[in-house]
Amino acid sequence: MPEPEPSHEWKPYHHGNLRAALLTAAEQTLRERGIGEVSLRDLARQTGVSHGAPSRHFRDRQALLDALAAVGYARLADEIAAATRKADDGFEAQLRAVAATYVRFAVDNGALLELMLAAGKAEGPDPAPEASEGPYAILGQLIRHGQETGELRPGDPERLRLIILATFQGIAALVSSRQVPPGQADALISDATALFTRS
Amino acid sequence: MPEPEPSHEWKPYHHGNLRAALLTAAEQTLRERGIGEVSLRDLARQTGVSHGAPSRHFRDRQALLDALAAVGYARLADEIAAATRKADDGFEAQLRAVAATYVRFAVDNGALLELMLAAGKAEGPDPAPEASEGPYAILGQLIRHGQETGELRPGDPERLRLIILATFQGIAALVSSRQVPPGQADALISDATALFTRS
DNA sequence: ACCTGAACACCGTTCAAGT
DNA sequence: ACCTGAACACCGTTCAAGT
């Protein structure tokens, strides 16, 4: 007896969306086994498709990794936006919340974050969002607001943004590379934040 | 006519030191073509040796990369030590010199530094030196000295060390990942240093 | 349009064998 | 002690061919 007819005309062989399935599998492999273990052939096996199929959706391995990095940036931006909305009890608390979110993301998604930062160094198009959007834009807005209300020290806001970003990113890197235990992160973030707000 | 006798008894087949030759070739390949292109087989070809030979000196590919990271840490420590010796015109200048050296190292040896930082996350033994030695020790000494003479703000020296280290490392990461043009690094370093020294 | 499957040129790792 | 060379199980990428 025949299979029930698929709802309509063309239907992908195995997936409604092989592309999405590959990305999901890739992120899981990245998390569990590290970037070196992410191979197109293995992802094809995991999603039940022949080893040549992924090339329809990603020109090569790097294209898949770039797409994964873009997913990571979108998620980080969401998390930071959510954290700032939650911490509405003052400017310094919001700044701390941004940092804490960044550090937590770095700890929970170490390999993914590494991929996101490394993608910027390659030749191809950078999957990182522009400074005007994504996770960094929120920090920029926060800094301008803090300077307007006098809760943040004065000075070139762009340079201040970069220093704050560098410090938070550096703390995240120290925690993520286990040079600093995660439990110490909050104290470090508080110290650093106080450094910036204290005029 | 016979080859001139080698000076004495045993002589390695092709090298006085295959290990060193492999590391040199690896660093060059790392710099010119990126970490993904560093393969044991290719290094064996470059050094004129069979593809199985490297395993006598490095158990596997990761062991070679770890050794390369250790070389990097040693060189970074040397450069930072040299920079602080040179900049003997006051505490703040020394602190700036350390940061500038770190950033320059990151720009000149991007892939190597990435390797150094990534090695800490793997399972095996970390090639990074202890906090009591290597590049980070110099920063610790500098900070203690700065606090004693009152040129650096007071506070837990270990936490201050970590924040300063994080900030410098973060600036280096921003420059290295091209989120900040190299020409802007010095201004950023000066701003950050002033933030730390100004009580 | 989307996927298959063979083909090619690469890997890392292991291991008996040579010197 | 140190290296060779074959063997094995993997890769990424390409491309004619199928549905």
Image (cartoon, coloured by chain):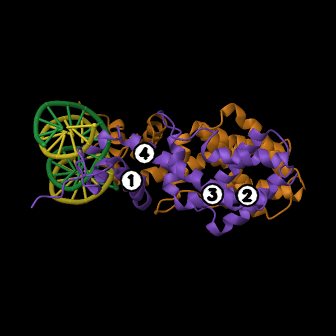
Chain colours: A orange, B purple, C green, D yellow
Closer to the N terminus: mark 3 or mark 1?
1
Tell me the kind of residue under disc 4.
Leu
Q: Which quarter of the picture shows residue A85?
A: top right
Circle 1 — which element?
helix
Residues at badges 3 and 1 in contact (C-beta under 8 Å)? no
Q: Are marks 3 and 4 on the same chain?
A: yes
Is mark 1 in CB contact (under 8 Å) with mark 4?
yes
Residue B94's disc is: 2
Q: Which residue is mark 4?
A: B65
Q: Which chain is indicated by disc 2? A: B
Can residue A11 be seen here? The reply is: no
How would you rate the neighbour count of disc 1 (Cα within 10 Å): few for under 14, some for 14-19, many for 20 or more? many
Camera-near label (3 vs 1) is 3
The spot of residue A35 in percent (x, y) is 44, 43
Q: Earlier in the sequence, mark 1 or mark 2?
A: 1
Which corner quadrant holds the N terminus of chain B?
bottom left
Q: Residue at x 79, y 59 (%)?
A: B90
- Badge 3: residue crowd in 10 Å (few <14, some 14–19, many ≥20): some
* Mark-to-mark CA distance, 3 and 4: 26 Å
Q: Amino acid at mark 3?
A: Ala
- Numbered disc 1: what chain? B
Q: Nearer the viewer, mark 2 or mark 3?
A: 3
Chain for numbered disc 3: B
Q: Position of residue B55 (x, y in %)?
A: 30, 40
Q: Which residue in the rendered view is the most extreme toward the bottom?
A: B183
Residue B82: give its label.
Answer: 3
Between disc 1 and disc 2, the foreground one is 2
Question: Amino acid under label 1?
Answer: Ala
**Which residue carries the number 1 mark?**
B26
Distance from disc 3 to disc 1, alpha carbons, whole Å, reads 26 Å
Front position among marks 4 and 2:
2
Q: Earlier in the sequence, mark 3 or mark 4?
A: 4
